[in-house]
Image (cartoon, rainbow, N blue to C red):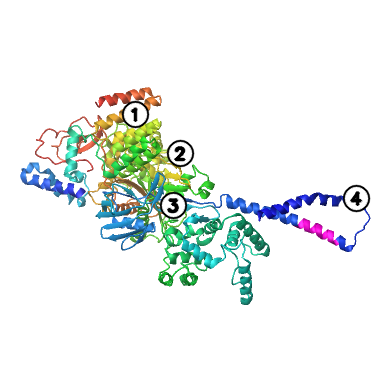
Amino acid sequence: MNWKIFSVAVFSASLLAGCYTAPQRPAAESRTARSPLPDAPATEQAPGAVVSPAEEKGIQISAYEPASRTPLIPMHSKAVSSLLKRADQQAQSSDLDGAVGTVERALRIEPRNAHLWHRLAKLRLDQGRATLASDLAVKSLALAGGDVELKRENWQLIAKAKRSSGDINGAKVAERKARMLN
Amino acid sequence: MAKTTRKKSTSVAKRKPATRRKRAKPIKKRPRKRGLFGRWFSRLLALSFLFSLVLGVYLLYLDHTVRVKFEGKRWAVPARVYGRPLELYPGASISPDQLVSELQQMGYQRSSYPKQPASWSRNKSRILIRSRPFSFWDGEQPGHFLDIRFSGNQVDQLSEVGGGELALVRLEAPEIGSIYPAHNEDRVLVRRSELPERLVQALIVMEDRAFYQHSGVDPKAIARAIWANMRAGGVVQGGSTLTQQLVKNFYLTRERSLWRKLNEAAMALLLDAHYEKDDILGAYANEIYLGQDGGRAIHGFGLASHFYFNRSLGELNLSQLALLVAQVRGPSFYDPRRHPKRAKERRDLILSVMHEQGLISAKEAQAAKRAPLGVQQKGDGRGSYPAFMDLVRRQLHRDYREEDLTSEGLRIFTTLDPWAQQQAEEAVTDRLTKLEKGYRLPKGKLESAAILVDSENGEVRALVGGRSARYAGFNRALDAVRPIGSLVKPVVYLAALMRTDRYNLVTQLDDTPLSIKGKEGELWMPENYDHVAHGKVPLHTALANSYNLATVRLGMDVGLSPIAQLLEQMGINRPIQQVPAMLLGSVSLSPLEVTQLYQTFAAGGFYSPLRAIRAVQSSSGEPLQRYPLTVRQAVPSGPVYLVNRNLQEVVRNGTAKRLTRYVDNSFNVAGKTGTTDKLRDSWFAGFSGDKVAVVWVGRDDNKPAGLTGSTGALQVWGDMMRRLRPVSLELLRPDSVETVWIDPKSGFKADEGCEGARQYPFIAGSAPTVTASCAGQSGTSIRRLFRSFFE
């Protein structure tokens, strides 16, 4: 499916290039500048322009504006959705071990899906493995990007896990962090 | 038979007092009244009593032996080891060729249209598969009839033939080996009900026609054999029944003597009296010796089927079954791999006899005779991954006794990706040969180890223990503990960047000569690889170009102990000798340990212990143990992000520039080269978006290999990764990191209007606060050249 996105990007880039005035054509320019660069002498300046327009835009925004927010409803591939459904069924029939295995399977397909790490953390907390649950939630946090909702849920989970393992101070810190994301 | 023995023993018991009385008699000194005959008669009687007593006890003993072994656990069943199952789903990065290679390894057969399980067909980018059902650790997976359409190297559509679209299907797990005991007997147990009827018919008609009629021993067959042997003047025919053959293999030694023959007959009679014919046949089918694979003895039809045809017994056709029965008479004499002609003759004879006996039609016999032997080459699949199996064994030994592994029939599900393993092996072999040629190095001296793991979960996908990866031997991936050279530098820089008050990526370092006094007063004077001091250099440049002097100065400032501690936090358990030389990699680690270290980098500072095993299941299908995914934040993600960005620069602009030969320049990877004194060790460690790989190249005799990290290990690494089609590395910027425009000349804060300014990541608050003179001078919209550090 990537080629579709790619072709749309190229198409819109060329559209932009056609419509806008010269100073506003960085995207098209840097694309054309891209090919000779790898062979150019490896000075420090060289890699500057080796960025695709989308990445460049992202960097510009992230440097000066708050991080972009991803949609709050998690988007999963069909394969992962089917596994999550199965994990839910397993969890409902109190087969927590089975559910853990299923979420791990989903994570092999989408290893950087923060929602899956969170789901795993939740299951581990249900199993009473508080420390592992908290660690998994931290991992989910690291991958959550701009998904504030998910981040809050992770902090809440961490707070719960810390409280259940007797770390009251840690729990309070986590709760505060969760509140800050409201 | 048991009843009769019991009778005998009771009669013996009854007579016991009599013998005792008899012994007492001489004391009374009774006059001899009986004649010579009577005396001999009573002696004979006593002797026969004694004999029957001994015989009775002996038979009881035999009976006990026969029953205990037959009813108890009959065989030590080796643990079977499986690789990771292939997950098919729309969007999966799998090429048609990769799928085909997977299917072939699992013994699936190509046909024009798959009709029976374990077969497939291909029409360009469309593959149809009838998959086998498989029992996974998390449940049964039914067989499917799959229709898979590819688009390039990706699964595009997945559906069930005659059904709807499928979101996800897991193929069976490919078997990659077994853990068999020291006496080297390997087997796959089959039940009587799983024995194909044709196999049973062929076996009985060839080996023991009266099997269902006789009582363990067949006197007619023995007479026939004696007659035939006498006529031929030597042993040409045996009169053993299947029961006797079973007894011979099962209970007795291989010696040939009359005593053993008698024992064999007695035990065969006992066995036949106690058990059903079908039970005996089932045991026979699992016990019979049917081949030899190096040190491994192939026992039973279940394993022999895999050994010769790489398919399970139920999937064999008539000619293949006949070939298996041919092996009964002598697996080395009729070895279809070494003596195909002999094997074919014997197979065809069996087919003819089956036809004569009315078991198969003439047409069937003809067709089966025309079929090729169909034997697979040895070394396809199982038994071919000695280095990985070594890792599996070591991980299993933490939780299981050797005995349980070799006898309990455990099923072990591992993380090995056979396809990735093959790519890794080929990359190692190809590149080493090319390196030896290209650099005119002595032939055949270079050795290597390569490891491939998943970035986020630490699962080991491939492990190459040496150049001849298919032969067990010194497992360099686990046991070659070598100085890691500059591979340690990212840890030194990480330790520095964790001190945000002192260091950031643009901090100026001093790359000038220095000498450090050791504990015994000796002077250590490190040098740069190019013997040039570079003066003031930004921190990121020092790492990208692997400058030794700047690194040693940096490390000495940070302190050896925090660096050693960091190594430990990131998963290195070996004690680290805290000497200044450790900053340049005097510390020795195995490739596996280095992989663990770089996995922690690749996963953004999260440590997950490297795993080769996912789950263990009992022979009855019960889940015994899972080896779950665990994770722990070992180091804060901000500084790790900075180092990872810097490791990307190593590939773009630094010591690993050569990698562009293998991967497209737009493709992001991070990595580090490592070279040790006199070019003894050549290392490369790095990661893409989904995989971490570490390669070591050197010599077993520790003599200089003549290669740097970049000219040696990097080449293998690049070749391997190129074959694996990895995902580009897109680092996720943690919230704690901000990007700031920097003027590279001054190292001060700049803005996008500055000539040559670029963006660098900083831990929030650690960026330079002094503004360069160029900032704010020109309108920002005029020169909108976006420059970003390392991109």
Give a yes or no on whether discs 4 and 2 share a subunit.
yes
Question: Cα distance, mark 3 to mark 1?
Answer: 40 Å
Amino acid type at image mark 4: Ile
The answer to which image quadrant residue A139 occupies is top left
The residue located at (39%, 59%) in the rendering is B107
Q: Is residue B382 above or below residue B256?
A: above
Q: Nearer the viewer, mark 4 or mark 2?
A: 4
Q: Secondary structure at mark 1?
A: helix
Main SS of the magenta part reads helix
Q: Which mark is residue B518?
A: none
The residue located at (81%, 57%) in the rendering is B46
Mark 4–mark 1 CB contact (< 8 Å):
no
Query: How far across and how far down the image is residue A60, in percent?
Result: 17, 37
Give a yes or no on whether discs 4 and 3 share a subunit.
yes
Identify the residue under disc 2.
B575
The answer to which of B184 and B501 lies nearer the viewer is B184
Identify the residue under disc 4.
B27
The subunit letter for the residue under badge 1 reads A
The residue located at (83%, 50%) in the rendering is B20
Question: Outermost residue, bottom direction?
Answer: B231
Amino acid type at image mark 3: Ala
Amino acid type at image mark 1: Ile
Q: Which residues are magenta?
A: B40-51
Q: Which mark is residue A158?
A: 1
Identify the residue under disc 3.
B387
Q: Is residue B487 visible?
A: yes
Chain-order first, disc 4 or disc 3: 4
Q: Nearer the viewer, mark 3 or mark 1?
A: 1
